Image (cartoon, grey):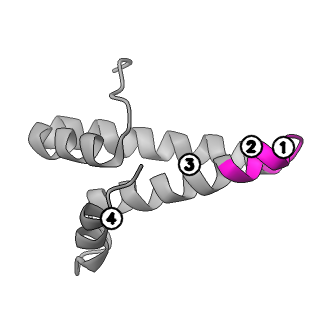
Amino acid sequence: MIKNSFISVILQEENRGSVEFQIVNFTNKIRRLTSHLEFHRKDYLSQRGLRKILGKRQRLLSYLAKKNRVRYKEVITQLDIRESTIR
């Protein structure tokens, strides 16, 4: 799913506030929460947290798409995320 070489390059970066680092971090949280919710279907607080993180990641992805389309495409392909059709 996640290509480790890309993730390690992003995580080794000095600038942990970069958009790419935040997107990778949110993606890891989303995958962890998704696997948690497969076992605990009625955990509504985790569902709410997942929706909030999804919204944050979507806003960051739309920002990155506006600012630098090449980096956006690279992040999308490396993290195996679908491209947004809304916006």
Q: Name which of mark 1 and mark 3 comes first in the sequence.
A: 1
Q: Give the image location of residue 49, x and y in percent.
A: 68, 50
Identify which residue is drawn at 46% across, 52% down.
27
* Mark 2–mark 4 distance (CA, rounded to whole Å): 27 Å
Task: Considering the whole magenta stretch, tell me its main secondary structure.
Answer: helix
Q: Which mark identifies residue 4?
A: 4
Mark positioned earlier in the residue sequence (1 or 4): 4
Numbered range of the magenta stretch: 35-45
Q: Position of residue 71 (x, y in %)?
A: 15, 47
- Residue identifier under label 2: 47
Q: Secondary structure at mark 4?
A: helix
Q: Residue at x 36, y 41 (%)?
A: 80
Front-most of 64 and 3?
Answer: 3
Mark 2 near mark 1, Cβ–Cβ under 8 Å? yes
Q: Which residue is mark 1?
A: 44
Q: Name which residue lies at 32% across and 57% down.
A: 3
